[in-house]
Amino acid sequence: MSAGLKPIEIYHIEGRRSFRVAWLCEELGIPYHLTFEKDDIFASVGLIRSANPSVPMAPSVVIDGHMIVESGAILDILLARSADTSMRPPIDSDDFLYHTQWMHFAEGTAQARMLGWRLVASALELDVDELPEGYRPNSPIAAALPQATPTALMNFLIGPRAIFDAIEAYLSEFPYFGGSRFSAADIMMHYQVRHSMLMSQIDLEDYPITTKWRGMVEQRPAYIRADKAAQPGGVDEHGLPIGSPMPFPVRRART
Ligand SMILES: N[C@@H](CCC(=O)N[C@@H](CS)C(=O)NCC(=O)O)C(=O)O
């Protein structure tokens, strides 16, 4: 248990990254309270704006009277302060290297690139998979795009599909993003995998090992408790609250 940790206040939006904080609290037995309006994303956003007007993001979390943002940073704070060390590998282990890499990869690379590709794909009315990925100056697709777009995108060596390929390759070697055992890195990556599927419209069925990992971590009692508390109306396969609109237009349904 987490001796010494006072209850934290999580400003939450259903189906959003604040779920990560609730899940880790459940895993570590940290007391928490979720502030949100059930079935009303915009009202939940309003609560966050009032509580944290300078950086209104989900999660916004009050820890010891301080308003803190960035889900990865919040998880790291809770890991560091909890007496329960089960959610992070020992610092001198090989697992710790992978755990730390994926803790940061989730928002630092995966999210940034999924969003970049999604914005460009939406603006050009293309599928994410139709955009060039990696440095391919002679690609016919690149040639068809407006000048500035492919140049910017091709400066990246890894895009959405390559990210899913890398995740699949890693999970074929290790059972968890924390290496040999489940860790907070799995919590960071779980939201990211679900959200990346949404943004890229890449089908997780193309990635059987990642699909199996996802099914396995969603069986954890702490996940189920957090899901009930944070998403009482249920979420779809992408983690969006049931009945909520698609957050961006998609050119065509993938076959
Ligand atoms: N990197 C941040 C991203 C937070 C974020 O973008 N949250 C979304 C909801 S999931 C949000 O509040 N969006 C509103 C905005 O960015 O203005 C984290 O991991 O906490």
Image (cartoon, rainbow, N blue to C red):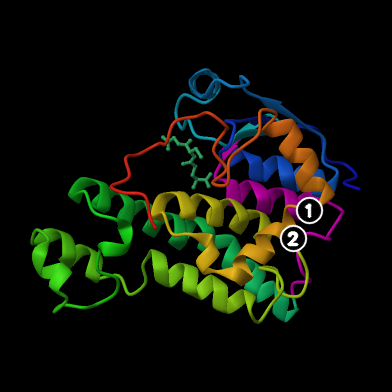
Residue that numbered label 2 is attached to: 216
Point 10% across, 64% down: residue: 144
Label pair 2/1, CB-CB below 8 angstroms? yes
Q: What secondary structure is marked by label 1? A: loop
Point 66% across, 68% down: residue: 177
Labelled disc at residue 196: none
**How many neighbours does mark 1 have within 10 angstroms: few (below 14), some (14-19), or many (20 or more)?**
few
Residue 32's quadrant in the figure? top right
Picture coordinates of residue 204, whole percent (x, y)? 53, 61
Amino acid beneath label 1: Gln
Amino acid beneath label 2: Met
Residue in the foreground of this view, choosing between 147 and 161: 161
Residue 33 belongs to magenta span: no
CB at disc 2 and ligand 1 closer than 8 Å: no
Residue that numbered label 1 is attached to: 219
Residue in the foreground of this view, choosing between 172 and 68: 172
Drawn side of residue 122 relative to residue 219, left or right: left
Point 80% across, 39% down: residue: 225
> Which region is colored magenta?
68-91
Which quadrant holds the C terminus?
bottom left
